[in-house]
Image (cartoon, grey):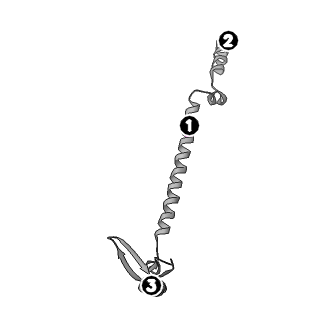
Amino acid sequence: MGSEAVYLFYTELNRESPRDLAHSPTSGVHVAVTVLASLFLLLILFVAVVGFKAVIKQGKSPEEMNLEKCSLCGQKMNKASLVERQVGDYKLLYFCATCINNLHNELITKN
């Protein structure tokens, strides 16, 4: 019975408690992996939210597709009521009737 008591005492001393495990050399690695995993999940969530917002903004109604800003005054109007002029190979300028009349009047008053 004496040897069993010594064996139980020895095994009880060598058993690692949760407190001892928290101070083990690998506990820092576990914490680092947990932090990195949490940051990765936050990154995925952030990318999903930004992507969702981008998709929502791109959806234009048919009415908005036919609207364009006047290049001079910046007022949004239907494309049918604007004069369209191309400058160079790619730039389109739109002019409303009010701005065209104002330019015409300026030209007449100068001459």
Local SS, label 3: helix
Local SS, label 1: helix
The residues tagged by marks 2 and 3 sit, at their Cα atoms, a distance apart of 118 Å
The residues tagged by marks 2 and 1 sit, at their Cα atoms, a distance apart of 46 Å
Q: How many circles with numbers are drawn on the protein? A: 3
Circle nearer the viewer, 2 or 3: 3
Residue density around tag 3, few if under 14, some if 14–19, many if 20 or more, within 10 Å: few
Work out whether mark 2 precedes mark 1 in sequence or the reverse, and give the earlier one.
Answer: 2
| Amino acid type shown at disc 2 | Gly
Work out whether mark 2 precedes mark 3 in sequence or the reverse, and give the earlier one.
Answer: 2
Span of residues in magenta: 30-34
Residue carrying label 1: 32
Q: Quadrant of the C terminus?
A: bottom left
The residue lying furthest to the left in this view is 89
The answer to which of 59 and 111 lies nearer the viewer is 111
Main secondary structure found in the magenta portion: helix
Above or below residue 24? Residue 8 is: above
The answer to which of 17 and 50 lies nearer the viewer is 50
Above or below residue 88? Residue 35 is: above
Q: Residue at 42% across / 82% down in the picture?
A: 79
Residue carrying label 3: 107
Q: Residue at 49% across / 68% down in the picture?
A: 57
Q: Residue at 35% across / 76% down in the picture?
A: 86
The answer to which of 52 and 12 lies nearer the viewer is 52
Residue carrying label 2: 2
Circle nearer the viewer, 2 or 1: 1
Q: Residue at 48% across / 64% down in the picture?
A: 54
In terms of image quadrants, where is residue 85?
Answer: bottom left
Q: Are marks 2 and 3 in contact (CB under 8 Å)?
A: no
